[in-house]
Each structure stands twice: as structure tokens, then as C-alpha cells.
Image (cartoon, grey):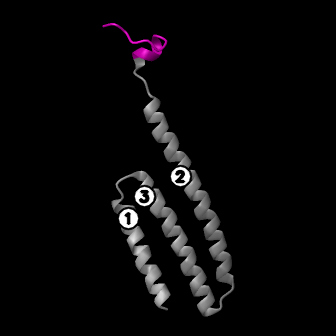
């Protein structure tokens, strides 16, 4: 049971990191770590209590956590990439050349 206490302590630290993270990528990483720790906690409870059906929930949660992390990373990458590629409107209308005003 000491292991569960340590896992819950780590989980609370990751939640703090998710709230205070300086960048969006840090928050995404903490989301991934929270998902991993929840899976480990489910597996630990399943093995302590000898409840085999909880393993199915752990597998489903692992798949949804992985897919969620991938989609969030793709979305954030596209948002940040589109912000860098924006050009002023006059450059677009002049074929990429700056106007001389």
C-alpha cells in the first residue's frame, strides 16, 4: 500500500505541473504522465484486490490516453505553426513583396 501512496503523491505533483506549466507543451507532457500514473494505479488496485476486470479498464484508458495525447499534440502543433506562417495582408495581395508606403 506504500506504493499507492507514492503514486498518488506523484500524481498530485503532475497535476500541479499541469496547472502551473510555463508552456502548453509542459501541460501536454503532464497530461500524458497523469494518464500513465492513473493506469498504474488501476493496475495496482486490480492486482491487490484480485479484480481482473479492472485490467480491461486500464487497457481502454491507456488507448484513449495515447490517442488523446497524439491528437492534442497535432492540434497544438498546427495552431503554433499557423501562427508563425501568417503574413500581413498587403504582402499576400502583392505576391509576397512588401509595399513601399
Assign the C terminus to one quadrant of the image: top left
| Residue 91 tag number | none
Pointer 1 residue: 17
Q: Main secondary structure of the magenta part?
A: loop
> Disc 3 and disc 2: Cα gap in Å?
11 Å
Q: Is residue 90 left or right of residue 3?
A: left
- In the figure, residue 45 lies in which quadrant? bottom right
Badge 3 is on which residue?
27
Q: Is residue 93 above or below residue 12?
A: above
- Is residue 45 placed above or below 85 in the rendered structure? below
Q: Residues within 10 Å of mark 1 (few under 14, many from 20)?
A: some
Q: Earlier in the sequence, mark 2 or mark 1?
A: 1
Residue 87, position as x, y percentages in the image = 42, 24
Q: Which mark is residue 72?
A: 2
Mark 3 vs 2: CB contact within 8 A:
no
Badges 3 and 1: C-beta atoms under 8 Å apart?
A: yes
Residue closest to the far top: 100
Label whose residue precedes the other's in the sequence (3 or 2): 3
Residue sitting at 47 percent across and 59 percent down? 29
Q: Classify residue 100 by image quadrant.
A: top left
Magenta residues, as a range?
90-101
Q: Which of the two discs, 2 and 1, sits closer to the camera?
A: 1
Answer few, some or many: residues within 10 Å of disc 2's Cα (few below 14, many 20 plus, some between 14 and 19).
some
* Horizontal side, residue 71 vs residue 12: left or right: right
Label 3, residues with CA under 10 Å away: few <14, some 14-19, many ≥20: some
Where disc 1 sits, the SS reads helix
Which residue is depicted at the point 62% across and 68% down?
62
Q: Position of residue 24 (x, y in %)?
A: 42, 52
Decide if residue 83 is on the left or right side of residue 69: left
Amino acid at each position: 500500500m506504500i506504493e499507492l501512496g507514492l503514486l498518488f503523491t506523484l500524481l498530485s505533483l503532475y497535476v500541479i505541473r499541469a496547472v502551473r506549466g510555463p508552456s502548453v507543451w509542459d501541460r501536454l507532457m503532464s497530461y500524458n504522465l497523469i494518464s500513465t500514473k492513473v493506469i498504474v494505479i488501476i493496475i495496482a488496485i486490480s492486482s491487490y484486490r484480485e479484480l481482473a476486470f479492472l485490467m480491461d479498464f486500464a487497457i481502454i484508458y491507456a488507448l484513449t490516453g495515447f490517442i488523446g495525447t497524439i491528437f492534442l499534440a497535432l492540434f497544438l502543433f498546427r495552431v503554433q505553426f499557423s501562427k508563425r506562417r501568417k503574413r500581413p495582408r498587403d504582402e499576400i495581395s502583392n505576391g509576397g513583396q512588401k509595399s513601399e508606403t
